[in-house]
Each structure stands twice: as structure tokens, then as C-alpha cells.
Image: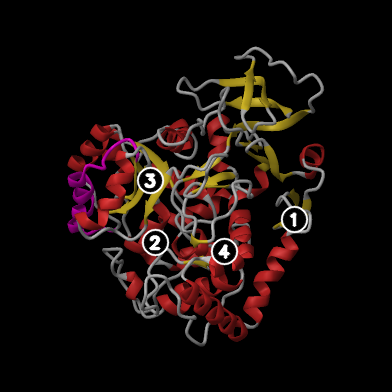
Amino acid sequence: MFVLRGTVVTMRPDGTVLSGGAVYVGDDGLIAAVTPSDPEPAGFGNAPRITAGGLICPGLIDLHNHLMYNSLPLWTEPSRTVPWTSHNQWGRAPTYSAQISQPARLLGATAGRALLRYVETRAIVGGTTSIQGNPRGAVPPDNDLIRNIDSEKLGTHDDFIRVSTLVADDAAALAPYVAAVAAGRGFIAHSAEGSDPKLRSEFRLLADAGVVKPQLVAIHGAALNADDFAAMKAGNSSLVWSPFSNLWLYGATADVKTAHSAGVRLCLGSDWGPSGTRNVLWELKVADLWNKKHPVFTDEELVRMVTSNPGDALSGVWPRPIGRLERGALADLVVVRRAAGGTYRSIIEATEPDIRLVVVGGRARYGLRSLMTPLAPTATPIRVGRLSRAIDYGDPAVTWKTVVADLEKIRSDPAGASARAAVTFAALAADGDGTALADSFVLLPDMPAPEVGDEFNRAGPPEPVTIPPLEPLTTGPDWFDTVDANPFHEGLLSGLRAYT
């Protein structure tokens, strides 16, 4: 247990900000009190008291991602001169398999544990404490670096969430999800991704199946209109907005102005490396850029898209509150350096150097060494750009250097890795009970894999596979140059450079 002192940005409905406040974090991974609103709890007399030196906020929640692909760079199809109009198109592009699907599959098959730690590290350095989009295959433990929303058990044996990445074609395909929603499970579903109005039929299928309820989290919704948003509001469902990916691929994004007017709960998601931002902290900046061009949201409303709004979306299915700093909530916190622009503007404009501390489930996982040392003495060093930080993977033998080294082994010998992957998948196909999968921590794709014939991806990756250099943890000049070169977003995303 410990006490974290500073300016507490609670993200409660009334917008309470406590100057000179304190968050009491219990050994049970929950918030015991937030003073001065709550009485000081008993039992904290000898607990370490840490001066945060910034804004204490709820940990950021990324409600849409595909983690397995986040070691890969931004992708454009050279033969494509106009934006795509549907998510059904780009998975068949000439370079998609070689540049996205194959390298991700090979890393997931041969270095799954290291890959997951790499992509979680990429998220946590941006203040993310919970992320959606866990790969299929081996399930990480609850006490991993950050929460994996799809598989998080919260100390129970319950499976709280169902996820549909590939859009269901008919009512029969939706049947398992209908049953899950009826049982109170959450349902996270891609729907209407693209600019083609015909994609609205994907949402209508959800509505006709009766799953547009509080448990539904619809991802993208770029083709939806006022009638669809009215249905979402009536069902108290949530919409996840991924503006960077939408603009990158389709040159257009969801009509969030109409969604906001209808009262739909809006959240943010950074999608994936090939068409997304480094982490949800940068997706918040994309939303800010869009909002400057089309003023709709206050700064507080933007910050709620990565804190209390996704927390509310999960509150109906998770047994503990998240996304707000209040007694009894999950102790997921981030400390952000305070800037001159004000409380919420400080969070919106923050970049990786401004993240001072990240706490997940009451455990300090990443941050300044001066803050990590009293809370996580076994944390190991990590370089984040020019920054010196400390990170706790839960095992002193695991360091950032070992994570990178495991991935670089695969990059340096993709042919050998492919041969090992073929053996793994052959064993998996032979035993059929998941033993080979569990023993080797294999991660499987959740996105289209056109080079694979069966849904379980049991065939080894085709030769040759080229794995690109690992992407840096921080957002820098090379990434911005790539952004500038894509005309689909008509220059809007080039404004991200100004936040550095």
C-alpha cells in the first residue's frame, strides 16, 4: 500500500479536481480513499507517501487495438491512389500479406511472450493501463504489465468480454454473442468501418439481433448516421472512435458530432501499428486536431474518452469501477506532468516524456526512477527515446533488453523461425487440445491472413518472411515524415508534429 500526493483529476461526473489531494492505494489493488473528499482510511500509518509532482489521473484506457501488429510500421499500399471505402478491401491489397500479416504471424508464433511484452511496453510509456485487442492464442496472466481487456479476469474465473474482430455475416454467426450478451457479458464488435454507406447493414444486423444494449461496444462506426446513433443511445451502447486509422485508410472518420449530439458515449482507440498511433495518448491528440477543425468537444470531454467513458462502457460487465479515481475503484493511475495550459490541456498535449508514473492494480509498473524506487525496488532500467525510466515486468529476469533481444533473434533468422513455427503449428494440429499452444505461448492473428487457408492458422508462414525493424517506443520524426507522405488525410494528421 502507498499514498500518492498531488493534484488529483478524479474524472468523476462532477469534474472534481483536488488540488493538494491524495490517493490511498491498498494492497488489494483498489483505491481505499481519495482525500480530502473521503476520510483518511485506517491502516496507512506506515505506508510510503509519494509526492507525484504532477497530475494524478485515472490510467488511460485504449478500447480498440490489435496488439499483435504493434511492432510494425505505418503501412500504405503503393498501388492505391485513392482512399479505401470499406474494411473489406485493404486485406486483399498486394503488399498486405508480406508487410503485415506474415511478419506478425511469425513473431507471434515464435516469440509470442516477448512480442506481447513489447507492445504492452509501447502502450504503457504513453500512460495506458488497460487495452483492448489481445491476440488469439495464449492468454496472458492478470498480473501482466497492463490489463488486457479481452481476457482480464480481475481475480476471478469469469470471462467478462466477447470480441468480434471480423464482422459477422448473418444472424447465425452472431448467435454466440447474442447468448453472451443475454448472460450479461460484454460484446466488443467491429461495425461499419469505412465510408461506404452500405456498411450500415453491419450495425443493423447487430440491432436486429438485439445486442445494441449497454454491454455493446461498437468499434469504428464510420458509416453510421443519425438513426444509428439514436439506436445506440436508446440501447446505452458505446462507440469507439479511431480517427487516425479512419483518416489513414479511408480519408474520413465517424460522424462523432452527430453521435455526440445524440448522447452516445464516445471512447478512443489507437487501432494498430499499420494504420494507427503509437498509443492512445497520441490518439487523443488526433481527436484534438479534429476538434480544432470541427469544434464539438471540450477539453474535459476529450479526456473522458480515454478515462471515464471507457470505464463506464466496462462498468456493466466488470465487477469493479475503472476510469475514475474514487473509493473502491481499480487502482489504475497515471501521473502526468502539469503544463501551463491547464488541467485537461496538460493531459491532451502530454507526450511520452511527460508520463511520470504508471500504476496498474495498485502496483507501480513504469515511471521515473525517483518514483519507482520506493514502490518497485526490483524494477529494471529502460530507455524511452532520450529518457531514462524504470519498468517492472513482474520478473527481475525480464528486462527491456531481453524483450528486444528475443524479438531480434527472430528478425535475424526468419527462415529458422519459420521452420520452428511450422513444427509448432503441426504439433497443435496433431494434439488438438491446446497443449502445444499453451506450452509455447503462441499468439494467433485476429485480423485477415490471406496467405492462410484455415481459420486456426496452423500452416507455417510462407517463405520468405521479412520482419521490419522494431518501431521505437516514442513518436518521432521518421513517423511524422511517413504521416506527411499519405495524402488521404488531406494534411490533418500532419498537425501531430506540433505536439512534440
Residue at point 48% right, 77% down?
A: 430
Q: Are marks 4 and 3 in contact (CB under 8 Å)?
A: no
Q: CA distance from mark 2 to mark 1?
A: 31 Å
Give the mark nearer the N terminus: 1 vs 3: 3
Under mark 1, the amino acid is Ile
Q: What residue does disc 4 label? A: 438
Q: What residue does disc 1 label? A: 382
Is residue 384 one of those drawn in magenta? no
Residue at point 53% right, 77% down?
A: 427
Locate residue 466, reporting x and y percent.
55, 81
Mark 4: give few (<14), some (14-19) or many (20+) Cα within 10 Å: some
Mark 1: give few (<14), some (14-19) or many (20+) Cα within 10 Å: some
Under mark 2, the amino acid is Trp
Mark 3: give few (<14), some (14-19) or many (20+) Cα within 10 Å: many
The quadrant holding residue 71 is bottom right
Q: CA distance from mark 3 to mark 2?
A: 16 Å
Q: What residue does disc 3 label? A: 240
Tell which of 128 and 115 is nearer to you. 115
Q: CA distance from mark 2 to mark 4?
A: 36 Å
Q: Nearer the viewer, mark 4 or mark 1?
A: 4
Is residue 209 one of those drawn in magenta? yes
The quadrant in which the N terminus is found is top right
Q: Decide if residue 318 is in sight here.
A: yes
> Which region shows up in magenta?
194-215
Query: Compared to 67, does 353 lie above or below?
Result: above
The quadrant holding residue 20 is top right
Q: CA distance from mark 4 to mark 1?
A: 29 Å
Give the mark nearer the N terminus: 2 vs 1: 2
Q: What residue does disc 2 label? A: 248
Residue 111 left/right relative to 491: right
